[in-house]
Image (tube, helix red, strand yellow):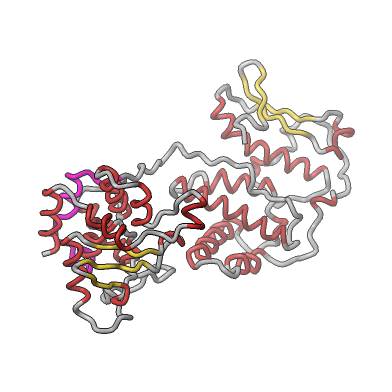
Amino acid sequence: MRKTQYLQRLGQSWYLRVKIPSALQSRIGNTHFRRALGTRDLDEAVRRKWHALAQVRAYFDSLLGITPPSLPPSSVLSSAINCTELPPLSRLQLIAKPPSSTGLDELAKKWAEIAGTTKTVCYQRRQVYTELRAYLGADHIPETVTNAVAATYVDDILSTSRDSASTRRRKLSALGAFWEWMGSRGHVPKGFNPWKGFRLNTNDRKTPQKRPYTVPELVRLFSGFPTYPALREVMALGLFTGARIDELCSLTLGDVRWDRGTAFVQITKAKTSAGVRTLAVVHPIAVEVLRKRWKRRPLPSTQLFPELKGGGYDKRLSWHVGQAFRYHRNKQGLTGATDFHSLRRTFITRLENLGIDQVHIARYVGHSLPTLAFKVYSGGATEATQRATGKAISYARDVENAVQQFLK
């Protein structure tokens, strides 16, 4: 969507320019409606146009006989539009009231629990609708939420929330997906979606770009005395294997196999299909961590880190570990641009700097490869290749000394 959509510049000022519905053009005597936005600045005009557009569309709806829900007094257009009052016309079939009178509460529950939806997405959908319902004040039928109501909600709630820019965009996208789902099932007219066309401001509260750790930062990170169970060992494995935090916390004893001093670790709970892989762990520090854990329990089904308990709405074993890691990281003065996943970034960066082939790196860390030869015809990396990649990893002496002291 271009920035100047619905905008027209006359002289030095910006105006809202909206096409009048064809059913009203002969009565109003024009094809487009124009309204001054009171600014010469384009960015400010973009910000103001959505509220003005909602007002104009609400006025058109009233002329077409479509009664919108009550809006704040500032949204009333009776004196803001310079045109003659027209008798209401019959309601357009395209925006006709759907036959279903099911409330949004019931529909949102069905939408959140669609078959195949993960627990995380289900929770996020419930959260998005709960916030919208609090704004609406009660359960309503879907047609209550018009373009004007959606625009006011975006301007007054989403745009001003303390959420990050990505979270605000996700919530707006979720509301749009909810209306698309209702349209596909006949609860709203198909194609009508009041949440489309908005652009949320992302210039404020920018989150830092995530990056790998530097050597001094690694020395600081692997210092101190965190007390959360298994945190130190999971951090060390993250640094020397590049595995994701959930992959590590989900390991069982049966996932670890030994061959001539090398630990072959089967990653089964991965983010993507490419992430299902076998790691060859060769570095002495990581091998020692795995060996100590592997000797403690006899049953293959036992968790490698049995002291970990599930948390969050998905009951992930990594949830509390992630919280403890962030607390430790902040305590060491490393905030914002680095997280646990930065250990993975550091691992990949280190292998690249050591001259390891990019295909071997991708196979080791569980990244998908783009070509058909790798996706369809290749059988994947051999254990010998994985062992060679695992054997190559090493860090500066200061870092390795810090990790050894950290684990004691």
Q: Quadrant of the N terminus?
A: top right
Count all numbered tags in the image, as a single digit.
Answer: 0
From the viewer's perspective, is residue 126 above or below residue 218?
A: below
Is 359 situated above or below 185?
above
Q: Residue furthest top?
A: 11
Magenta stretch: residue 231 in it?
A: yes
Whole-percent x, y for residue 48 in the image: 59, 34
Residue 136 higher or lower than 260, as above or below: above
Which residues are the magenta region? 212-232
Please state which of residues 180 and 259 is positioned toward the viewer in this rendering: 259
Q: Residue at x 23, y 68 (%)?
A: 230
Dividing the picture into quadrants, the one containing residue 186 is bottom right
- Find residue 408 and report its horizontal and vertical position in percent: 10, 64
Q: x and y percent of residue 276 in the render?
A: 41, 64
Residue at x-position 43% and y-position 38%: 204
Q: In the image, what residue occupies the spot 27% across and 51% down? A: 347
Tell me what residue is drawn at x 75 percent, y 41 percent: 59
**Is residue 69 positioned above or below 35 on the image?**
below
Q: Is residue 24 magenta?
A: no
Q: Nearer the viewer, residue 250 or 331?
A: 250
Task: Examine the image and state in which quarter residue 175 appears.
Answer: bottom right
Image-based side of 342 in relation to 262, left or right: right
